[in-house]
Image (cartoon, grey):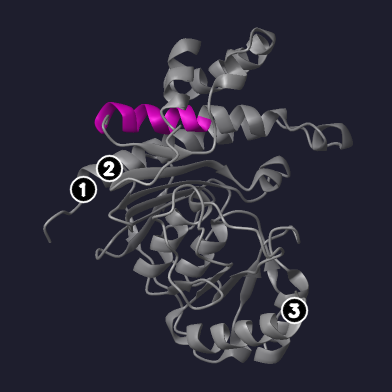
Amino acid sequence: MSNSYARELAAALQAVRDASLICQHVQSQIVLDSREKEDRSPVTIADFASQAAVCRVLGELFPADPIIAEEDAAFLRLPENTAFLNQVEAAVTATLGDVTSAEICEWIDRGGANAYSERFWTLDPIDGTKGFLRKEQYAVSLALIVNGQIEVGVLGCPNLTRSVGAVRGPGLLYSAVRGQGAEVRPITPSDAAAEPIHVSDCGDPRAARLCESVESGHSSHDDSAEISSRLGIAGKAVRLDSQAKYAVVAQGDADVYLRLPTRKDYRERIWDHAGGVILVEEAGGRVSDVDGRPLDFTRGRALEDNRGVVVTCANLHDVVLGTVREVLQNNATPA
């Protein structure tokens, strides 16, 4: 293998671990009452702080690499938002030690790349906003893309568990390198041993376990229910937020994840999928869009040439994809 990506993997693991610990710190302070459920400030603080932590590591170790991420620091630099910036600084300092607000803004803005390049990182500092606020599932997702192909992916899932293996959680750090398989380790301690993960060997769609987005605005639940019925899936779909769904399939705790289009003009963002895609593929699974095409990461910030996502263990992809295409074609609204 000409490039093992060992340095990139080590950096990504450190960066996502740091960000996950920051997110855990912020989430621990959320009070679950009717007032706080309408208050998005905790997730916004964590978004900025998480991006700062990841971009800090990548900026130090790979300063020439562009980073396509969700946030920029323009909001934080406004004088009227000084108090908010101070909260972000406190969140970062709680995990990384003393830093300045100027450093934090500089780190965040390293994620401001917009266009495709031959080598770049893509980051979702918190995937699963509502799950984060509910103290349920969310993820920190980071991936390295080289010549249009995902080469390294790391997912931090601070609240996720596994049903088998020595590493069970809660609090799991998943990683994959192209051609080298997929692994899971605890988020803490940092020197914890990793173990391989694999998708299930389920070959009967009637026995498949399906997971999907909690929010119907993210994926069509009606289409998903019809697909499940046609496949003969007996179990009820498990709904959870974020790219944690990719991890659940990769570790064999689910067999199918569907993200079905809700609007004809909607296109997925690359940071919502890149880390999860390589994790599932290196765990032995398959990923395509609803038309059977591989996801194309060469079009900048969005998957412009893809519709939806179908994620399965290897044995089920063809039959699931065929059923997805039939249902979506039958339910399509005439132009």
Label 1 element class: helix
- Say what amino acid the circle numbered 3 marks: Ala
Q: Considering only vertical position in the picture, is 135 above or below 102?
A: below
Q: Position of residue 143 (x, y in %)?
A: 38, 49
Mark 2 — residue? 10
Q: Position of residue 14 (x, y in %)?
A: 35, 37
- Say what amino acid the circle numbered 1 marks: Ala
What's the magenta region? 50-62
Q: Which of the two labelled residues, at mark 1 and mark 3, occupies the earlier sequence position?
A: 1
Label 3 element class: helix
- Say what amino acid the circle numbered 2 marks: Ala
Q: Do the numbered discs 1 and 2 sit on residues whose CB atoms are within 8 Å?
A: yes
Mark 1 — residue? 6
Q: Considering only vertical position in the picture, is 48 above or below 248?
A: above
Query: Quick check: can you spot residue 119?
Result: yes
Q: Quadrant of residue 58?
A: top left
Residue 194 relative to residue 263: left or right: left
Label 2 element class: helix
Report the quarter where the C terminus lies: bottom right
The Cα–Cα distance between marks 1 and 2, rounded to whole angstroms, is 6 Å
Q: Position of residue 276 (x, y in %)?
A: 46, 59
Mark 3 — residue? 225
Residue lying at the far front of the rendered structure: 335
Magenta segment's dominant SS is: helix
Viewer-side label of 1, 3: 3
- Badge 3 crowding class, 10 Å Cα cut-off, few under 14, some 14 to 19, many 20 or more, is some
Residue 296 relative to residue 231: left or right: left
Residue 151 relative to residue 241: left or right: left
Q: Which of the two labelled residues, at mark 2 and mark 3, occupies the earlier sequence position?
A: 2
Q: Is residue 215 magenta?
A: no
